[in-house]
Amino acid sequence: SANVPGSSNMAAGTNRRLQQTQNQVDEVVDIMRVNVDKVLERDQKLSELDDRADALQAGASQFETSAAKLKRKYWWKNCKV
């Protein structure tokens, strides 16, 4: 191949294209890693939000029960007066 004219230029061109392709692949891999990190972070935030919503729902149910008991208590108290 050393005796073929232009073979070193062809090899250099192939290497350059190969390096460009490798650079593009590396860039895509980096972007995908960032995206995966963002998805995992989003999942964590959604999980925390879900937990907070559950706690809020439990608090609302407890409030509703307490309010109903208090309403009954004062209704009976009012009847006795």
Image: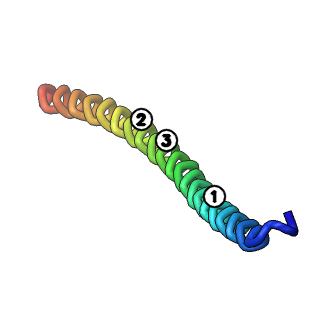
Q: Nearer the viewer, residue 49 or 9?
A: 9
Residue 58, numbered circle: 2
- Residue linked to disc 1: 25
Quarter that holds the C terminus: top left
Q: Work out whether mark 2 precedes mark 1 in sequence or the reverse, and give the earlier one.
A: 1
Q: Which residue occupies 73% across, 72% down?
A: 6
User: Nearer the viewer's eye, disc 2 or disc 1?
Assistant: 1
| Distance between the alpha carbons at the discs numbered 3 and 2 | 11 Å
> Residue 2, how many percent across, how many down?
87, 68
Image-quadrant location for residue 55? top left
SS at badge 1 = helix
- Asked if residue 72 is positioned above or below residue 31 in the image, the reply reads above
Residue 71, numbered circle: none
**In this picture, residue 57 sits left or right of residue 15:** left
Q: Work out whether mark 3 precedes mark 2 in sequence or the reverse, and give the earlier one.
A: 3
Q: Nearer the viewer, residue 22 or 64?
A: 22
| Distance between the alpha carbons at the discs numbered 1 and 3 | 39 Å
> Residue 70, how many percent across, how many down?
27, 34
**In this picture, residue 27 sits left or right of residue 62:** right
Neighbourhood count class around disc 1 (C-alpha, 10 Å): few under 14, some 14–19, many 20 upward: few
User: Nearer the viewer's eye, disc 1 or disc 3?
Assistant: 1
Neighbourhood count class around disc 3 (C-alpha, 10 Å): few under 14, some 14–19, many 20 upward: few
- Residue linked to disc 3: 51
Q: Residue furthest right?
A: 2
Q: Which residue occupies 52% across, 46% down?
A: 43
Q: Are marks 2 and 1 in contact (CB under 8 Å)?
A: no
> Residue 19, how many percent across, how many down?
70, 66
Q: Which residue occupies 29% across, 34% down?
A: 64
